[in-house]
Image: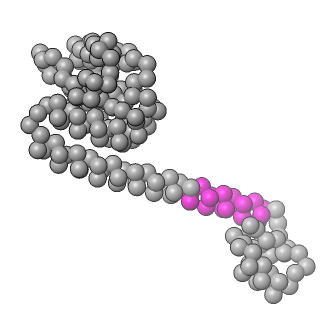
């Protein structure tokens, strides 16, 4: 709210400032340039407040994600079984991405792909084999992204270490994760 004075006296202007929630007060005689600068200043303040709110929200989300990552890391440190580690990674990814379900697959050089247990019961075998062939092709080409999209309804997040594609997290029926979420999950 901007008050442009007219015939009002000082007492009326002070009352308006104190009771109307004004952001700016421009005294008479005023020029159009003064009003333009006032509006530009208010728009800048609005943009800065909005950016600060977005930054604060992002920081809060990253804090929650880091706490979740720390909890998963503690659980992973006690794992001795690859499938159990993949189960923990898939469950953490499901929570972070707000997906109804998630699966994880890992593959090392010369070995068969290893899946999280949830994937073995929740995904059709044709889907498993299709994802495995995409993963193998990406590893053969030494790239960190799949050569094509996974089957419909699945979102893939590559698990990359250095320049090596180690596996994938698959999110079922989930919206496309944002860059921050992808980085976190990877």
Quarter of the figure with the N terminus: bottom right
Q: Residue at x 39, y 28 (%)?
A: 172
Residue 8 in magenta stretch: no
Q: Is residue 46 magenta?
A: yes
Q: State the predominant SS element of the stretch in magenta.
A: helix
Residues drawn in magenta: 33-49
What quarter of the picture does the C terminus occupy?
A: top left
> Relative to 145, is 16 on the left or the right?
right
In depth, the one of 176 and 123 nearer the eye is: 123
Q: Quadrant of residue 25?
A: bottom right
| Left or right relative to 161: residue 47 | right
What residue is at 15 percent from the left and 16 percent from the top? 112
**Residue 165 location, quadrant:** top left
Image vertical order of residue 57 relative to residue 85, above or below: below
Check the image and report above or below for 185 versus 168.
below
Q: Residue at x 29, y 49 (%)?
A: 68
Position of residue 81 in the picture relative to residue 150 (left or right): left
| Vertical comparison of 41 with 137: above or below | below
Quarter holding residue 163: top left
> Residue farthest to the front?
121
């Amino acid at each position: 709210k901007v008050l442009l004075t007219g015939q009002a006296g000082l007492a009326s202007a002070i009352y308006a400032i104190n009771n109307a929630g004004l952001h700016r007060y421009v005294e008479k005689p005023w020029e159009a340039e003064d009003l333009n600068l006032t509006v530009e200043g208010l728009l800048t303040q609005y943009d800065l407040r909005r950016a600060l709110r977005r930054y604060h929200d992002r920081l809060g989300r990253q804090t929650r994600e880091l706490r979740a990552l720390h909890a998963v890391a503690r659980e992973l440190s006690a794992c001795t079984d690859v499938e159990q580690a993949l189960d923990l990674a898939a469950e953490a990814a499901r929570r972070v991405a707000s997906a109804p379900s998630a699966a994880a697959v890992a593959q090392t050089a010369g070995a068969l792909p290893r899946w999280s247990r949830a994937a073995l019961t929740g995904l059709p075998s044709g889907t498993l084999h299709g994802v495995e062939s995409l993963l193998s092709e990406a590893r053969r080409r030494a790239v960190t992204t799949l050569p094509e999209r996974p089957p419909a309804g699945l979102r893939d997040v590559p698990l990359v270490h250095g320049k090596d594609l180690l596996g994938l997290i698959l999110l079922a029926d989930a919206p496309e994760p944002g860059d921050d979420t992808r980085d976190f999950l990877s």
